[in-house]
Image (cartoon, rainbow, N blue to C red):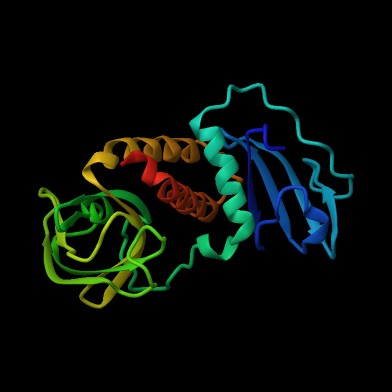
Amino acid sequence: MGNIGHFFGVRGAVLCPRGLFALCVLLRIVVANLHGDVIKTIACKSGVCRQCIPSGGCTDPVQPLPHSTETRGVLANAFDAISELFAEKPERYSIHRVRGGELGVVKSSVVRLDGTNVELESVVKQLESGLYEFSFVPLSELASGPREVTSVSSNVEWKPDRPLLVPAQRVRPGLYEVHVSHNESSGAAWVLVCSREAYDQTVALFHEFIAQTEHWDGSVSDETKQASQRAYLDYLASQQIHFR
């Protein structure tokens, strides 16, 4: 199925590797094309998977996926790659919601490293002005080694009409989870920190991917869209060395 442009999302369970549905215990698998149009829904229980029909029943044998007539491009190859990432470590990309006191940060973003500062306005653009604290936790090998806080910047003032440059002397290009705190509230975002040379190309690819996920139909949950964006950032992080 490597030559077909499909994306796999799961409701209520982990993602099943392509071609191994019978080995997984899942609630429901949604298969969509690259435009987010749902092609089929598959329900699995106790190692047995059945294809669902529009009327709601899930008793039919699973039929092969249709061949795509679309020309493959960068995004199609990326969808193949992130499907593999989902299959290997589905829990890595899961979205955990926090009740109350959660800041409305942008969950996934590509940002630029400017000398010893990281430009983070794309992460906090929906937040009110004020003093914020930021910490960076590396998520990729391109970042700074062990998974530990590598830089903390206290009392950085954010104003919506100005750039936000966060001092981060020990941060280098790579994938990070950025923790943002303000008063009694906090939030977290995945950011791919890029060098000046890599930024324009990388952010363009990510925006193109986001545009695709925004056109997925309503049967694809927001959590699945956000998880796919995280996986794509992970994929871009693995490719970033080629953009330098």
Which percent across, then down, holds residue 220? 58, 47
Q: Where on the picture, by quarter, is residue 117? A: bottom left
- When the figure is inspected, residue 154 is found, relative to residue 117, above or below; the finding is below
Residue name at image x 55 percent, y 36 percent: 77
Question: 194 or 178: nearer the eye?
Answer: 194
- When the figure is inspected, residue 170 is found, relative to residue 48, above or below; the finding is below
Q: What residue occupies the far bottom of the structure in this picture?
A: 184
Residue name at image x 22 percent, y 55 percent: 120
Q: How many marks?
A: 0
Which percent across, then down, holds residue 84? 61, 50
Residue name at image x 38 percent, y 40 percent: 242
Q: Classify the position of the N terminus by image quarter.
A: top right
- When the figure is inspected, residue 142 is found, relative to residue 80, above or below; the finding is below
Q: Classify the position of the C terminus by image quarter.
A: top left
- When the figure is inspected, residue 237 is found, relative to residue 203, above or below; the finding is below
Residue name at image x 50 percent, y 34 percent: 75
Which percent across, then down, holds residue 68? 68, 26
Question: 238 or 183: nearer the eye?
Answer: 238
- From the viewer's perspective, tell me whether residue 48 is left or right of residue 11: right
Question: 170 or 92: nearer the eye?
Answer: 170
Which percent across, then down, holds residue 55? 80, 43
Question: 84 or 163: nearer the eye?
Answer: 84
Q: Where on the picture, by quarter, is residue 12? A: bottom right
